[in-house]
Amino acid sequence: MALQAESKKSCCDSVTDYFTSAKFFIYLGHALSTWGDRMWHFAVAVFLVELYGNSLLLTAVYGLVVAGSVLLLGAIIGDWVDKSARLKVAQTSLIVQNSAVILCGILLMVVFLCKVQLVSLFNGWLLTLCYILVISIANIANLASTATAITIQRDWIVVVAGEDRSRLADMNATVRRIDQLTNILAPLAVGQIITFTSPMAGCGFIAGWNLCSMCLEYFLLWKVYQMTPALAIKTGQKEDEQELKQLNVQKDVEAVQKPSESSELMSGVVEASSAEKKNGCCYNITEPFRTLRDGWVAYYNQPIFFAGMSLAFLYMTVLGFDCITTGFAYTQGLNGSILSLLMGASAITGILGTMAFTWFRKRCGLVRTGFISGVAQISCLALCVVSVFLPGSPLDLTVSPFQDITSHFMGDSSLPEANPTTDSFINRSTSAYEIEEMKPQVVSYLSVSFLFAGVIAARVGLWSFDLTVTQLIQENVIESERGVINGVQNSMNYLLDLLHFIMVILAPNPEAFGLLVIISVSFVVMGHMMYFRYAYKTLRSRLFLCFSSDPKNETDNPSPPESDKV
């Protein structure tokens, strides 16, 4: 009985310790943050389409502004994260992000409520100004969200995990599982609110959620900061303090021994400071550009450069559950219910990928886990390439991939009239009944079945590979450059993502989707080839070090496995 009581007490204590640990508070804060982000990202696209008469124009403009902003400002945001105190960065980005979403929600509520009056004022220019404000404020929220992701997921987690790489891998995997779950549940929740109430009620709900979530997340950040003293000190700050102390000591000694030299030194400092004041304006103006340049140069010089580039290349694909792939699936006869089930299956395989990452990392090491994940993803995507040539595939090389663009902008009457069943899957404003009438009569579902089977199965390797590269960056980038390197990495990801949208704009008709699939798989293969090069060089250098070390020392003090090395 005494043993049972002790075991129950120890179990309760362990549960209590977990739910009061810094690790759990990070998970809870991340869940609240990503839930709000996923709701907002889903709802803002719906709101913009609703406001602009069922057209995708505002949504496309918003996506272009967001991608371009992160592409240009990613390194600058990361540099700010590196040079500022951790708690200040986290709290500032949190407040800016949630305040921007709240303000945007209120503005959208006003537009929905007074749209008729706004259209009549100043020939509709006031309504256009509201659209510009909504997109601009939403873009600020996204930039603040980028800063939050860099500081929490790329920096705080590393510090909280300490020197334990296994714990770091588990925390990274748990964060990704939270991402997968919120990616399904949050849009589902806000979608029900918008459907059964109104878009204006959806705006109010999101604004209220972000207000409450901001207060709770602020408290959780402060709690984690108090529980982890290492967060209060950055490596760069420690080195700067030591250098300042050494300089102060040297100056005191030189002032006593050589007063004449010290006076000359002081006069030189005054002249240098006056020169800096003369050029201060130009220096401050060009500082963001120099930060941007230095960030990209630092990223290029990192040992994990090819690993980061390999992850960025995976964004150049139409083989994901975004508006492009779902739009194509709709032209192939799949309804919304089937698509929602496929998205759920994709999330499940993504969670399995996070579990596979932790399992393989413990047994094979981090670098080999990335190699295995890449082989798994490429093997699954082979099904997508096969689907292009199966019965039911709309691939038709006799149809020009630029037919929709030339007919729309050039007005060429020699081109055949666009068929509603083969028109662009990024369509114009049409009613739901008209869309249902335009759905094609598919002869076979074999092609689209192979396509989505490959996409869903590849998520296991994709998310395992994503976690591998994330931890490689965390472990191999020094603390003082962690923010700027991750900022440049985000910029690279957005750049390749932007290119994939441009590729779809150039070839929007379903007959060309097969070519887009082949191009996408080619970019994925190229990305993994970059990683294979990185893995080969890394493992070869480790093997060389192993053989060049003293065999006597190896037998006496065997090195720990790769997964536990610090």
Image: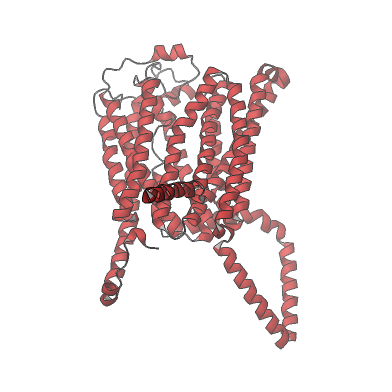
Of residues 51 and 5, the one nearer the viewer is 5
Residue at the extreme bottom of the image, as rendered: 257
Question: Is residue 319 at all visible to an observer of this figure?
Answer: no
Of residues 528 and 515, the one nearer the viewer is 528
Q: Quarter-wise, where is residue 436 in the image?
A: top left
| x and y percentages locating residue 19 in the rendered image | 49, 46
Residue at the extreme front of the image, as rendered: 1
Of residues 347 and 484, the one nearer the viewer is 347
| x and y percentages locating residue 561 in the rendered image | 31, 61
Locate the C terminus by quadrant.
Answer: bottom left
| x and y percentages locating residue 193 in the rendered image | 54, 22
Which residue sits at x=35%, y=52%? 530
| x and y percentages locating residue 505 in the rendered image | 45, 31
**How is the rendered protein coloured?**
secondary structure
Of residues 527 and 366, the one nearer the viewer is 366
Question: Is residue 365 at all visible to an observer of this figure?
Answer: yes
Number of marks in the rendered image: 0
In the depicted structure, whether residue 219 falls above or below residue 473: above
**Lateral position of residue 86 relative to residue 559, left or right:** right
Which residue sits at x=34%, y=37%? 349
Q: Quarter-wise, where is residue 392 in the image?
A: top left
